[in-house]
Amino acid sequence: MASAIGSLPQHPETTEKSRPVPENSEANGGAGCPAQDPDVGSHGADPLPGKKDLFIEADLMSPLDRIANVSILKQHEVDKLYKVENKPALSSNEQLCFLVRPRIKNMRYVASLVNADKLAGRTRKYKVIFSPQKFHACEMVLEEEGVFGDVSCDEWAFSLLPLDVDLLSMELPEFFRDYFLEGDQRWINTVAQALHLLSTLYGPFPSCYGIGRCSKMSYELWRKMGEEEDGETKGRRPEIGHIFLLDRDVDFVTALCSQVVYEGLVDDTFRIKCGSVDFGPEVTSSDRSLKVLLNAEDKVFNEIRNEHFSNVFGFLSQKARNLQAQYDRRRGMDIKQMKNFVSQELKGLKQEHRLLSVHIGACESIMKKKTKQDFQELIKTEHALLEGFSIRESTSYIEEHIDRQVSPIESLRLMCLLSITENGLIPKEYRSLKTQYLQSYGPEHLLTFSNLRRAGLLTEQAPGDTLTAVESKVSKLVTDKAAGKITDAFSSLAKRSNFRAISKKLNLIPRVDGEYDLKVPRDMAYVFSGAYVPLSCRLIEQVLERRSWQGLDEVVRLLNCGELAFTDMTKEDKASSESLRLILVVFLGGCTFSEISALRFLGREKGYRFIFLTTAVTNSARLMEAMSEVKA
Amino acid sequence: GPLLQSERPSTPGARARSGLGLMNRTKGDEEEYWNSSKFKAFTFDDEDDELSQLKESKRAVNSLRDFVDDEDDDDLERVNWSGEPVGSISWSIKETAGNSGSSQEGREQLKSRNSFSTYTQLPKPASTYSLSSFFRGRTRPGSFQSLSDALSDVPPKSYAPELGRPKGEYRDYSNDWSPSDTVRRLRKGKVCSLERFRSLQDKLQLLEEAVSMHDGNVITAVLIFLKRTLSKEILFRELEVRQVALRHLIHFLKEIGDQKLLLDLFRFLDRTEELALSHYREHLNIQDPEKRKEFLKTCIGLPFSAEDSAHIQDHYTLLERQIIIEANDRHLESAGQTEIFRKHPRKASILNMPLVTTLFYSCFYHYTEAEGTFSSPVNLKKTFKIPDKQYVLTALAARAKLRAWHDVDALFTTKNWLGYTKKRAPIGFHRVVEILHKNSAPVQILQEYINLVEDVDTKLNLATKFKCHDVVIDTCRDLKDRQQLLAYRSKVDKGSAEEEKIDAILNSSQIRWKN
C-alpha cells in the first residue's frame, strides 16, 4: 500500500515529509486538495511493501472515509483494518501500519505492541504514519520505550478536508483545548502550513486581517514559511482578495448560544460529524439509521440550511406539495409521455422525495426533543442574558436546571454564558452554583471548574476589591520582576470579557420595532431569532467595511486584543475585482454553523463570497466537553 | 474472518435484495484504473519525467471524472444496518471487530453482508468530495474556478518543495547549525542534534528562538532537551520568567504523566492550588473504591481554597458512605428478604454517583429509615447540608416514581402553631405538578396540586395540558369567563360528565359572566 500511506524516506530516522502528488488526488474520489491525498506520492518506494494490517485511530476514520474507501486501501495491499484502541492486537500479519494523530498514548500503544512481540521473539515490520504531522514528543516516547528504530515514522499532511463548497475543516477538535486551555502552540505550525498551501494554490492574499494571539502567531509563522520558500507565490495572481483570522476566545458568547438555524440545530441535536450525520430510527421512521451527507449537493438541505428553523416547515411542506403535483402529472399521460417521464424526471423526483422525507423526519424529531426540554424557556433565558436583563431570574433558571440534573453540559454552558455576559459571577452566586453543580453531577467536576476559570469561560468577580484596583495591582505585578509569579487566576481576572460594553459599541442587540421578520431577515441577528448579531461576524463585517481596524480601537481594547489586532495590505494591482469579493475566514478554535450562516447572509447582502477554514466545526456542547475533566 | 480477505461477487439478486441503489462501477473498473500504466512508480529521481507524468495522470483523472459524473449515480449509497456506507472504512473496521465476537449483531451483519457484494460500489461522486465544486459556475478564463484548475497552472514544485532541494540537505548532520537554523530544521520535523548547545546561555538562546517561532512542537522539543540536560532547579528558575515555554512544559508533563516533576514544578512556582488539583486529579485513575477512598483522604489536607477544601472533604465523606450503603444493600438484595429490592431490583451500584443521585437512591430505598443510619435521606441532608429545595425536589421525584402518593402529600404538608395544616412547596407547585405528571400520577392527585398553583394563568395552562377538566371548568367559572368555558366545551367528549357540568354552569343564572 505504498502509495496510500506515503513514501518511505531514505532514512527512516530523518523522516522527510512526504509531499503528496496533487494530480492523483481525484483518483480516489479525492479531496482535490493535494496535501491530503492519502495516495501520497512515490508509488514505487513502498514504505511497507506487501500485505499489511492497518490500524486507524478512531478520530481519523471519518475524515478518511470522506476521501478514500476500503477498496482503495485494498489496492495497497491492506489486509485487515483495525481501530487503534487500548487492547492487544489480534493481528497475525507480518507488517503493521498505524495511521494516528501524534499523541503520546498512541505511541505507548505502539510501543507496547512492539515490546510484546519482542518478548515473544517475534519480528515484524512496523510503520507509524502521523497525521497531519509528527511531534518530537512522540519520537521521544518511542525512544524511551526502546522501540525507536524498530518503528519507522512517516507523516501524512492531511490537514484540509473540504466539507462543502465553502467550508474547509482541519478536523482538529483538540486544537481548542490544547491552545485555549493548555496554552500549547503545537498546532500553529499545522495552521500555518494549511495557509501556506492555500496561498500556493490561490496566490497571495492582498489583504490580511486578524485578531487574537493565536491568529497573530499563525500569521507570522505562515509569513516566515513564505519567505523561506521565496518565489513560489511571486507573480501569482491573487484569487482570494482577503483573509481574516480570528481566535475563538475573541468571541465565546456566540459559540455558547443555542443554535436555531437549521444546520446549526441539526448539529446541536444530532451532531454533524465530518459533514455527515447519523439519523436514527426516530428520523428515518424505520428500524435502521441512515448516514446522510449534508452539503450543497443535497438540494433540499441547501435551501433550508441557513434558514431560521421557524421557516423550515413551511418550506418543506411547499416542496412536498410541488413534488406531489409533479408525480400527479403521470395521470393522463400516454405511453410515450410516460416513458419520457420515467426516463427523464422520475429519478430526480425520487431523489427529491428521499431528501424531503429525511429532512421532514429530522424536523419532527427536533421538534419533539425541543418541546420536551422546554426550548422556549431556554431561549428566553439566553436572550435575557445576552441583553443583560432579569439576571436574577436567569440565575434561578440555571439553578433549577442543575437541581433537576438536566444535562450537565447544558447547565455548564448556561453558567458560562452568564459569566461572560456579566464579566464573571458575583462570588456568592459562583460558590452557590458551583456547590450545587458538584452535588448534582459529581464532585470531580471541581477540575472542570478549574479548567473553565483558566480558559476565562467561567470566572468569579474579585470579592470586595473593585476590578480596576485589582487590575492595577496586576499591571504593577507585570512590570515587577516577579512577572512569572502571576497566577492564572490573576491573568484571567485581568482578561475581563467586557461583553456588555462591546455589545453596545458594536450594536449587537438590534433594536426591534415590532416583530422581527425571520422570513425576511434584515441583519445577521436572524441566526439568533433577531436577538443578537454574532460578535465574531460583526467584527468581520466592520473590518471589511473599513478595510482596516481603524475606528475600532475601543472595541479591540475591550476585547483585550490591544496588540493583537493586525492588518497587512500588500499593494496588489493584479487582484481582479472579482477576487476582491472573495474572503477566506479562518477560525482558530472552531466555528459554528450559525456563524457560517450569518456570514453567508452578509455575503449575499454585500456581494461578498465567504470561504471558511476552521480547525473544526464546533458548538456549545463540544466546547464544554473539551473543558470537562470527566470523560463520559 | 475479516472482510477484506474474501471476495463476494455482486449478483443481480444481491442488488435486488439490498433494496438500495447500487453504483455501477465494479472492482474491475477500479483495478484497471489503478493498475493502468499511467500510474507508474514515482521516485524522487528524474524530476522532469515525473512532472510530465503527473500532468498526464491529471488529464486521465479529469476525463474519468467526466465519466463518473455521467454515470447513473443514483446517489443512494449502500449502507449497512447501522447506517454506515458499505465499503467505508468505519464500516469495515466494525466488521473486523464484529467478526471476532459472535454476538447477535455480528451474525446479523454477516448475514446482511452476504447479500451485498463486497467490492462493488465505492466510487463516490467526485463532485461531492472534491474542492473542484468550490466555485463552480465561473467561466471566464483566468477567473477563480476550482482547485483542480488552480492546480494546473501552478508550478508543481510548490506542492513538493522538498523535491527541488539539493539532496545533500537530507543527509546533513552538521553540528554547526545556528539556533535559528536548528529551530527551523526542528520545525520541519528533521532530526537535528541539540548536543552542541551546552552552555546555559546557548540553551536559553535556543529556547527563545523556538518561542519566537511560535511552533509549540519545536518549543516542546527544546524543552525535552533542556529537561534532560539541566537540573530541575535551573530549569524551573529559567522557565518561571518564560511563561510560554512554561505552559508547554506543564502540558508536556501532564501528557506524559510525569506527575512527580509536575508537582515539583508547581511547588517551585508556589502555585499551591494547581498543585492540589493536580494531585486530586489522580483519583480518576483509581478504580477500586476502597483505594480511591484512601487516596481522597490524602487530598483533604492539600492547599485548596477554603471553598474547595470543603468540596474535597465532602467527596471523601460521600464515597465513604456509598461504600457502606453499597455493601449493605448488595447484601439485602441478594438475601431476597426485603420487599423494595425484590420489587425494584437495583440497576447499578451507587458507588461514585453524585450526591443528588445518592439522595434519590436513598429516598427510593431507605425513605423511612431513622436519621441515625448512614443511608437515611435525612442523614444525607444533614451531613451534606443539602438545601431544602434540592431535598424536596429529589424526594418528590423518588416517591412519585414509587407512586407513594401519601409520602408526596406529607412532603408538602406543614402544621402551623395552631395545629392547622397547610400545603407549602419550596419549589413552586407548578414544578410539583410537572414532576408528578412525568411519573404518571392519577388525575385526582394532579388535580389537587394544580389547585395549589397560585398564578391563575399557569393553573389554567397546566390543567388544560394535563386534562384536569374539573380544575379548568371551576377556574373559568370563578373567573366568570363564559367565552373560555364555551371554548373548552368543544374540547371535551360529547355526552361526558364534563360536558354536563359545563352546561349546568352555563345555564346557571347565579353567575354574572364578564363576557
Image: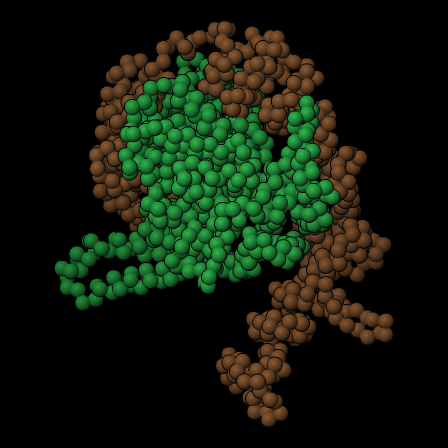
Residue at (69% x, 33% y) in the render: A473
Left/right placement of residue B254 relative to residue B65 reads right
- The furthest residue to the front: A551
Give the answer, above or below, for where B256 lies relative to B131: above
Q: How is the image coloured?
A: by chain
Residue B460 appears anywhere in the view: yes
At which x and y percent is residue A220? 46, 25
Residue at (61% x, 11% y) in the render: B201
At which x and y percent is residue A436? 70, 50
At which x and y percent is residue A16? 42, 17
* Nearer-the-camera pick, B21 or B251: B251
Q: Tell me the colour chain A is drawn in.
A: green
Q: Quadrant of the N terminus of chain A?
A: top left
Left/right placement of residue A350 relative to residue A223 reads left
Give the answer, above or below, for where A136 lies relative to B487: above
* Nearer-the-camera pick, B187 or A477: A477
Give the answer, above or below, for where B122 lies relative to B508: above
- The furthest residue to the bottom: B509
* Nearer-the-camera pick, B283 or B385: B385
Q: Tell me the colour chain B is drawn in.
A: brown
Left/right placement of residue B246 relative to residue A84 reads right
Residue A625 appears anywhere in the view: no
Q: Quadrant of the C terminus of chain A?
A: top right
Give the answer, above or below, for where B30 lies relative to B345: above
Occupied quadrant, residue A310: bottom left
At which x and y percent is residue B115? 35, 45
Left/right placement of residue A179 relative to residue B34 reads right
Residue at (37% x, 28% y) in the render: A570
